[in-house]
Amino acid sequence: MSAAQSMAARYMLVVSHTGRDDSLQAAVEVCRQLNEAGVTPVTTAEERDDILAHDPELHYVQVLENHVSLGDIELVIVLGGDGTILRAAELARGSSAALLGVNLGHVGFLAESERSALTETVHRAVARDYLVEERMTLDVRVKQNTKVIFETWALNEATVEKASRERMLEVVIEVDRRPVSSFGCDGVVMSTPTGSTAYAFSAGGPIVWPELDAMLLVPLSPHALFSRPLVVGPNSVFAVEVLDRTQGTGVLWCDGRRAHDLPRGARVVVRRSPVPVRLARLHQGPFTDRLVNKFHLPVAGWRGPANGEATPA
């Protein structure tokens, strides 16, 4: 480490899908570049084994929690799509480290740069040349009668779904301890603004700009007269109860990663979590541009102000 750099050791967590050749190669490149810059790369034990199998010279890669504690991680560099970023958020939960995503997937809505800019991304990470924004997350509890039987969290969404394809889920939805409606459905998505472009979007929910503090509830294939998506404030509380008349069981999924079976009578309570996820940003710009670019939305023919100039609409 040069004299111009901090004398304190620096650690960055590298998270990738090392089962894929492109992700493994990207992880190897990032680890090499971090080491050359005087920053110690850190991975999970499993990913370190894959990296060393590819290049035994990367023996300096450390293992999270075995060699380096989560609290010592400065930044998390994530190589992959949104699924890999969600896994990285799970690994970094409870720390102050921000997530810097490099898209190796398809949409990569949460990612900040592309594979072609990998070297520049690492340089800016080492130079601490990025901004950090915080994204709302959800606290999720499952109750049976009055007993809490499961607790977890979500960055994108908590989804109550039917466990059997041939069986409909019978639920009643609640907002702020008051019932709204009961119906049969395939499930119910409860989402953050970040998740509004994920599962909730696919189910017909609205896109919510990430700077807005709000929560969404979107029914999945409901058999009901009233089945519109709901958007509530950040201090509201959602609840979904699996009714006794359900023929079968349900399942709770959070970010598609953490699951819990829901018997009849189970109650899923979702509220804003006090622990956000921190995302590192390399580019400043309106969310509108990210939306257009990631979804390849057609804007040909638009004659508004160039470069987002502040002129009257």
Image (cartoon, rainbow, N blue to C red):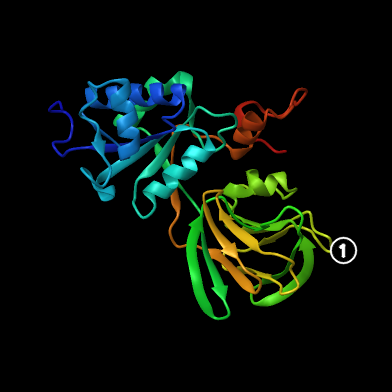
Residue 25 on image: x %, y %: 39, 21
Q: Residue furthest bottom?
A: 146
Residue at the image position 68 percent from the left and 71 percent from the top: 174
Closer to us: 144 or 132:
144
Image quarter for residue 222? bottom right
Image quarter for residue 161? bottom right
**Horizontal relation, residue 56 to residue 254: left or right:** left
Residue at the image position 65 percent from the left and 47 percent from the top: 199
Residue 137 in view of the camera = no
Question: Amino acid under label 1?
Answer: Leu
**Disc 1, SS:** loop
- The image shows residue 185, relative to residue 134, as above or below, that is below
Q: How many marks?
A: 1
**Horizontal relation, residue 173 to residue 127: left or right:** right
Residue at the image position 70 percent from the left and 56 percent from the top: 164
Q: Residue furthest right?
A: 225
Disc 1 target residue: 225
- The image shows residue 69, relative to residue 25, as above or below, that is below
Image quarter for residue 189? bottom right
Residue 93 on image: x %, y %: 39, 52
- Badge 1: residue crowd in 10 Å (few <14, some 14–19, many ≥20): few
